Amino acid sequence: MSFPSSIPSVAVLEEMLSRPTDPVVEFASRLSGDVLVLGAAGKIGPSLCTMLARASRQAGVRRTIYAASRFSNAIVKSQLEHEGIRTIACNLLSPPDLLALPEAPHILFLAGMKFGATGNEPLTWAMNSLLPALVCQRFPRSRITAFSTGTVYGWVPTHSGGASENSPLNPVGEYAMSCLGRERMFEFHAQRNQNPTTLLRLFYACEPRYGVLVDIGLRVFQNQPVDVSMGCFNAIWQGDANALSLLSMDHASVPPKVFNLTGPSTLVTREVALQFGRVFNQPPQFIGHEAPTACLGNVDRATRTLGSPIIPTATLIDWTAEWIKNSKPTLDKPTHFESRDGRY
């Protein structure tokens, strides 16, 4: 699999994000039945759905991939339909809409709320904790792969190598607490219904329009100070996150199988900013002081079971820097990764 030294356009970027790896094509050849993707129009959903559709075609397997979301962006809906994906415009918190969804042996759960969680806590808890319970009640026999977040661990020492899947959970702030609620609902219903489940604790999927690297790069490029209070972080190319999350469907179990989903390196915020500064010929400004703890994950289990990401962090930084330097479009959704009080 080859990748360019830079990404010339949004069209090329979206093709790269949805390009299936050989293991994903092999998995698609073995996967039996249709797939229902809930929350399919978010940051990850479109490329994840498209990767599965492309892998299924390459494997010569005919299946229906349903993509359910509000679809406030008609362009995303049209793009998915162009890939042969069957879209369903719905409000997942609406009982009639949830009941009307088609049965499917496999569910990918991507729905949730993060941005704007502070100040809208009731909806945050409804989306992140109530909705998983409603979905499990609606689909008691389906295999479920659900996205969670590494923030359920809280902060761990920066020299620790990151929290493992067996580490204590100590979420900071209502967003992270509600995401732990999401996991507990899937765990409870998996045990009650005996339906195999996978939980994916994602640590910052990145691509040139969105992610921690974009946040840092834009601040350097715009001569704004970079907050180094969260002195370290993890990141993974979103295309790799898509591929590994699809492969994780194979490992659903009761109780749920948990994977940390991120890159293998602990990245230092200050050093990454300095790298962007060299590309932009713009020395970065810094505020704050590095705390001795951060939100970090250990990926040994995922590496052993699912494989390693393909795209090195250095390449992802180069792509992001080139994208920003040439004023290409971003999603304008800061991650607020530097927050240490759990408020997003």
Image (tube, grey):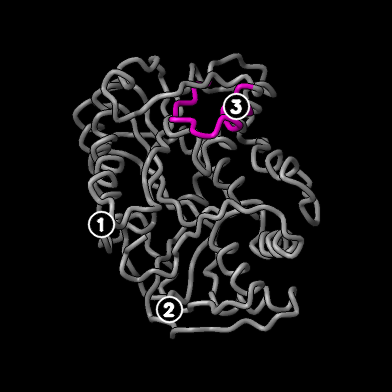
Query: What is the C-alpha distance between the residues marked 3 and 1?
Result: 33 Å
Query: What is the C-alpha distance between the residues marked 1 and 2?
Result: 20 Å
**Where residue 267 sits: x, y (%)?**
55, 70
Quick check: is 162 in the magenta stretch?
no
Q: Is residue 153 above or below residue 189?
A: below
How crowded is the residue under tag 3: few (<14 C-alpha within 10 Å), some, or many (20+)? many
Residue that label 2 marks: 229
Residue that label 1 marks: 174
How crowded is the residue under tag 2: few (<14 C-alpha within 10 Å), some, or many (20+)? many
**Where residue 111 sits: x, y (%)?**
39, 38
Query: Which residue is at 60% across, 78% downward?
Result: 271
Q: Is residue 213 above or below residue 52?
A: below
N-terminal label among 2 and 3: 3
Query: Which residue is at 52% across, 23% downward?
Result: 31
Query: Which residue is at 36% across, 28% downward?
Result: 91
Q: Which residues are magenta?
A: 65-81
Q: Is residue 211 above or below residue 247?
A: below
How crowded is the residue under tag 1: few (<14 C-alpha within 10 Å), some, or many (20+)? some
Residue that label 3 marks: 80
Q: Is residue 145 left or right of residue 129?
A: right
N-terminal label among 1 and 2: 1
- Mark yes or no: residue 168 visible: no
Tag 2 near tag 3, CB within 8 Å: no
Q: Secondary structure at mark 2?
A: loop
Q: Secondary structure at mark 1?
A: helix
Q: How many marks?
A: 3
Q: Amino acid at mark 1?
A: Glu
